[in-house]
Image (cartoon, rainbow, N blue to C red):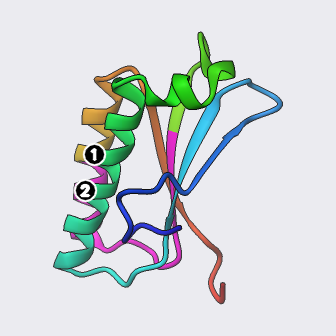
Amino acid sequence: MAVDNPNVIDAVGTERETGIVVLTVSDHLEWNDDHLVTLQEKLNAYLHFVLEGQLLEDYPSARNRKIRIEVIHKHRPHTEALAFLSKARAAIVAQGIEFVHRSLPEGY
């Protein structure tokens, strides 16, 4: 399960405090042009999974809950990657889905 396999949802869980259903992308790749394309494909697959109803089929308990896509990066995004992530956030939020991304602490 990783960002470079767009056919797999890396992780699905529910935050105890908020009840938000979180779909996590595990991103281990170094930042380059191919990475941006790979991440875009993965995010498109996640959107398809949610918007086409597969999430509710596989996880009926997600019904009537907020949804968040969260990308966890091994490597800190550079300027171009941050611009991409900002555009991705806008597109995802426009679909009524929350979006966040964060980097793991150095040394992970």
> x, y (%) of residue 16?
82, 32
* Circle 1 residues within 10 Å: few <14, some 14–19, many ≥20: some
Q: Report the disc number at residue 44.
A: 1
Report the residue marked by disc 2: 40
SS for callout 1: helix
Query: Looking at the image, which residue is at 45% across and 29% down?
Result: 54
Q: Is residue 75 magenta?
A: yes
Q: Label 1 amino acid?
A: Asn
Horizontal side of residue 6 vs 38, given as left or right: right
Query: Looking at the image, which residue is at 35% across and 28% down?
Result: 93
The quadrant in which residue 62 appears is top right
Q: Label 2 amino acid?
A: Gln
Which range is magenta? 69-86
Query: Residue most toward the front?
Result: 57
SS for callout 2: helix
Q: Is residue 74 magenta?
A: yes
Query: Residue most toward the right?
Result: 16
